[in-house]
Each structure stands twice: as structure tokens, then as C-alpha cells.
Amino acid sequence: MERQVFAAELVTKIVEYFTCFATSILRDVCLKQRGPEAAYADVLFLVTPAYGQPLSYLYHAHFEGFHLRVMLSLQGTLLQQCSVVMVLLLLIFFLLLFYAHFRFRRQRMEALAAKISGPPAWPFIGNALQFLGTIQDVLRTISRLLHRYQTPVAFWLGPFFYVAVARPADIETVLTSPLALEKDRVYRFMEPWLGHGLFTAPVSTWRVNRKLITPTFNPRILERFVDVFSAQAQILVRKLAKEVGGGECDIFHYINLCSLDTICETAMGLTVRAQDNNNADYVTATKRLSQIVAVRMFKAWLHPNWVFKLTPLGREHARQLRYTEHMTSTVNWVKPCVIVHLPRLRKIFTSCLLMTDRTITRKVFIDLLLELTGTTFNDEQLKAEATTMIAAGNDTTATMTSFVFLVLAIHQAEQEKVYEEMRSIFGDSKRVTTSRDLRQMDYLELCIKETMRMFPVAPLIARYLTGDITVSDVVVPTGSSVVICIQHVHMDPEHFPEPNKFIPERFLPDNKRHPFSYLPFSAGPRNCIGLRYAMLLMKTIVSTVLRHYKVTTSLKMADILLKVDILLKSVRGYPVALEPRRYNN
């Protein structure tokens, strides 16, 4: 009996909530359309908790142009008097009312969206049906939209409005606007993994941390890392020796471990020896996390956290996160240690500083984190920045470098030019690479840039608008997201003639183009902070390997199939065969 009375009261509260919600909706409409004198409402609640007594609920509201009356009367048990049909009718009514309110509040966005070219959208789901399929289909879908409609192109994913842009002038407008600094809402799916590091942080956090961390990426500081780059590249050469004569191998596996060792040592001061220990758990976990997050981004039904956690994918996501914890677990004991020894550490760090005209620049990223630990950074902030540096930096650098090897293996003439450049710098010597050597590798840099044009690791990026911006004479409203189609603009023949051909000379200094037509590291104030670091590391790895091995492959450019696991990657991996170079001494 008590359970039945409780159920009856629960239904009453639910109806009360929804009817009051309905009142607020209709009142908002009347106040906006007719003024305050047009709206009034009377609400009467009569509840008798004793079982068997009448339980009644009366709601009456009148607005100018609207009339709503709901009466619910319960006698005896809930199931006898409150039919399922009645509950369903009430539910349908309030869902329709909610949808009307939703549409009413989005009138301005929908009016502005209608002025932007794009495919027609269905109610509720928008254009989501066009994005069904694998995540590999997403790039093709957006590419088709950009070819069919005039850019910018508008589309809806459920209730969320997106505008895709591919003109350099439009891209510049977006990426340089202070109203487009926020990352799109889907980036939040990386937060359980990366935390609120520079890559995913809201603008308020990003502004402060970027200003603090940027000095550690000063070019003169980065050049001091080249010794570490070279040492790790030499280990890579030795590890690759076992693949000589054994046919093709996926070079990404080796590059990934080399990059992980290098980034951990130079950025965080950690010696993990991934190349020696094969650190399979961490590498596998980060690879799988990228795949899971990418799937979730493009599957709207996986967006709610409570739904995602109930799925097999969500449970695997939680399991893989645990494998990545050990890389940044040192943060838990670093802070108390630094607080105790902070005065001594400040003296040590100060003696290692480089003085510029008006600023002090630190040598190593970990130095800055350690010093900030005793002041403004808490453990979670330290962990977020550490994880971002290791996870995001490692995967992007390893992927870009692997593409360079694969492309040069296909284009033997260009690989030979790179090798001749190495001979002109090193002769037959097997000495390690120096920062001065890297500055002379002009043709190798052209090849790296051309590879990143054809295979940008971030083919799409998205920004959330906190205010209206004007793109190509149309207003993109606040609350919408802009998708920057980097791969599309990189393959536009207007900016890069014969875009499917590998032509490193495109990037000679004499060849001018719009500065926002080439975006391998994004652009604007929120571009990639590690672009110089990545270029130095890639040049070191590629030059060291090509001095020792000639790389070949059975693939042609047309055989390279692409997929998106957050980053753009090759479906077939990066298969190359290694042949040892012959030296005279």
C-alpha cells in the first residue's frame, strides 16, 4: 500500500514538473510576443496521501492565444485509475512542447543557418544519416559536401550546427578570431585521457598556461635537445638492423618507440627506454585510446557519458586509461619534493637559464613544470600537461615521420636527393647529428613539408564560436562550430597545382601562397606549440636512418588508404624494406 501511494505521489510530482515547465515556456513566448499583461496562470494542487482517498491534480493556465488545462485524478490504486495511455499521452505532449521551446530559442541560429549553403536537414537528427558508416567515411562525406555546395557549407549533427570552411581567407578569419579560440565540444572526449592540457583546455586555462609554457620552446632551447634526438636516432638505427633482408616491416612501430623515448627525456626528464623494453602496454594503450575517442566523436549516441560507460567500448576505454597512468604517475611525488627543495631548485634552474633582452627562458619543459609546482600548478594540472606532451606529441611526430619514410620509399629520386644532401653534410662519416647539421638540411625539410601537405596528421580541426563571426559574407552564429578542412585546402589545385604529385620544390622560398593555405600544425594564436620541436626531431630521425639505410616499398601512392584515429593514418601501415648503405670508410 505504501509503495502504491509513493508511486501516485511520484507521478504527481512528474506531472507538476512538466506542467510548470510548460508554463514557463508559454509565458516566455507571451512575454516576448505580447508583453507582460498577456500572461497569467492559476495552479491548484490537491494531494491526499492516505491510501484509498482521492488524489487529484489540477492545472489551469491561460495565456493570450494559448489555453492549457490538465487534470489528473487518482482513486484507489495507481494502476486502476492512471492508465498507461494517459501517461504516454502526457509524455508525448510535453516532448512536443519541449521541442517547440527548443525551436523557439534557436530561431536566430536557424535563420542564419538557412542563409548558408548546405544539404537539407531532417528534424531532430539533422544530417546525421549522411555521416553514418565508419570513421573513414567522414572525410569523404565532408569532401563531397565541399564539392557539391559552395564553401562555407552548413550541416547539422543532431541539435548541433556546423559550418565547414576550406578557403584560406575564411580559415584565417576563423583561426585568428578571439571568438573562435574554444575547441569544439567533441574534444571533451579526450579529457579523461589528456586532462585539461594545452590541447583540450578551455580558453581561460589555455591563455595562462600557453603564456607560461611557450618560453620552453624557444628555438635556442630546442637546439640543445638535438644531442638527445641524435642519441635516440642512433638506437633506432641499431634496432632496425634486424629488419635488413627480412622483407617489408611497418616502420611506425620503431619510430613510435624512438619518439616516445625522445619526448619523455627532453620534455619530462623521464628515461623510459621504450626502444629497449618495447614498452608495449603504453604504446598499445595510446593507439587504442585514439581509435576509441575517434569512434565516439563521430557516433552521436556515444556522446552521453552514462551511455558510453555502459558500452563495451566505454569499458575498454577505462581499461586502456589505466595503462597510460604510469607515464605521468611521477607527478604524484614530484610536488611535495619540489616544495621542500624549491629554494635550491630555483638556484639550480637560474644557473641554467638563457637570458634574452627582457625575458628569462628555461632549458627544459620539466624545469618549468617543477618550478610552477611550488606556486600555481596543482597535481592535476601537472599531470594534464605531462600527458599532453607525451601522448599527443609522441603520436603526431611518429605518424608524420612514418609518412615521410613511406613517401620517400615510393619516390626513389627524391630519396636519392636527400641522401646526396646528407653526403654533402656528413661525407662518409657516421658521426651524430648536430643542430648545425639540421640547419643545412634544406631539401629534406622540403620533403617533410610536402609530405605533411599530402598527409596532414590533423585533417580536420573544429572550433566552437563564442560570438558571431562573418565568413565569406555570411554570419556564422554564436553557439555553432566551424570545421577547418585542412586536407581539402592542402589538395586544392588553386593553391597547389597537381596536388596528387609529390613535388617538394613547392616549398622553395620563391613560391608564394596564402599563409593559411598550408596548415600542418594549425595556425593562429592556438596553433601547435611544438611545431619547431617536431620538425627538428623529424629531420634528425629521417636523416640518421637514411644515412644508414635505403628504404623501398611495394606500395604506390594510389595504394595508400587513409583512416582517421583522431590523427590521419595509413590503413595499411607504413611498410618499407631496408637496404644498408655502403660507406668508403
Image: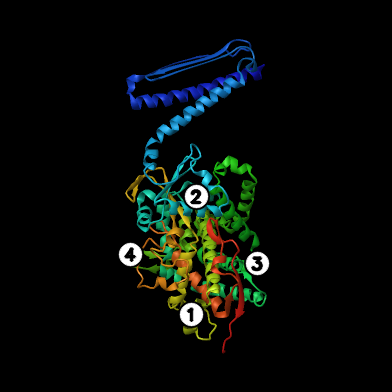
Name the N-terminal-most of marks 2 and 4. Answer: 2
**Which callout, 1 or 2, points at the residue further toward the start of the chain?**
2
Task: In the rendered structure, find residue 277 and report the number of the disc placed on it.
Answer: 3
| Mark 3 → mark 1, Cα distance in angstroms | 35 Å
- First-in-chain label (4 vs 3): 3
> Percent from the top left, x then y, of residue 541?
53, 73
Tell me the tag on residue 417. 1
Instruction: Return the x and y of residue 388 as percentages of the image width and height.
Output: 51, 57
Foreground: disc 3 or disc 2: 2
| Separation of marks 2 and 4 at Cα, in angstroms | 36 Å
Q: In the image, 105: left or right of 87?
A: left
Query: What residue sits 61% from the left and 50% below the top?
Result: 317
Mark 1 residue crowding within 10 angstroms, few (<14) / some (14–19) / many (20+) = few
Which numbered disc flags the more N-terminal residue, 1 or 4? 4
Which residue is nearer to you in this view: 75 or 506? 506
- Nearer the N terminus, badge 3 or badge 2? 2
The residue indicated by pointer 2 is 187
